[in-house]
Image (tube, rainbow, N blue to C red):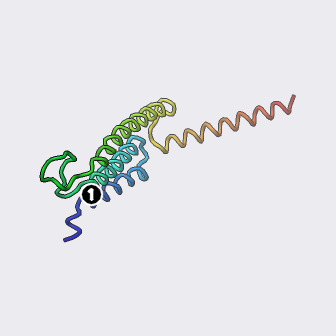
Amino acid sequence: MLLASHYNYWIVIALMMIGLYMVIAQGNLVKKIIGLNIFQTSVFIFYISVGKVDGGSAPILSEGVTLYSNPLPHVLILTAIVVGIATTSLALALIIRIKGAYGSIEERDIQAEEALQERSAQQAAAAQTSAGKEQ
């Protein structure tokens, strides 16, 4: 019975694990961003759940109310949502630049292209070194 009464914490744990799995297991950069957003949402839900006071009223002075809820966690979550949106938009802008530079947003393709560029740079440096020795 105690486990069922804290269903919101089980939802937080499930969302955290789903988001973490998406970040680790997915190769697509957009899917990784979605996983980070799911993880971030689970943190928001956790903070809101911790800040909720059963039977608590809004922190407005009125007669007969003795138990108040603390508004600080909810205000912090509003700020975190704004920061999360800005971070997501920056990440998506970077993904657009990566797509333009490498032609793909798949992590495996990007790493293969990086390795190919590194090999060609090493070959060019070796050719330049050998040409310098011949002169």
User: Residue 24 location in percent, x, y?
Assistant: 43, 52
User: From the viewer's perspective, is 122 left or right of 111?
Assistant: right
Residue at x 39%, y 54% (from the top left corner):
20
Judging by the rendered image, the residue that carries numbered circle 1 is 11
Quadrant location of the N terminus? bottom left
Q: Residue furthest front?
A: 63
Q: Nearer the viewer, residue 132 or 93?
A: 93
User: Residue 110 location in percent, x, y?
Assistant: 51, 40
User: Residue 46 location in percent, x, y?
Assistant: 30, 54
Classify 133 as above or below 54: above
User: Residue 77 location in percent, x, y?
Assistant: 32, 45
Q: Amino acid at mark 1?
A: Ile
Element under label 1? helix
Residue at x 31%, y 41% (from the top left corner):
78
User: From the viewer's perspective, is 27 left or right of 18?
Assistant: right
Q: Nearer the viewer, residue 1 or 67?
A: 67
Residue at x 23%, y 63% (from the top left corner):
6
Q: Crowding at label 1, few (<14), some or many (≥20) Cα neighbours within 10 Å?
A: some
Q: Nearer the viewer, residue 39 or 73?
A: 73
Q: Residue furthest bottom?
A: 1
Classify 95 as above or below 15: above
Classify 1 as above or below 105: below
Quadrant location of the C terminus? top right
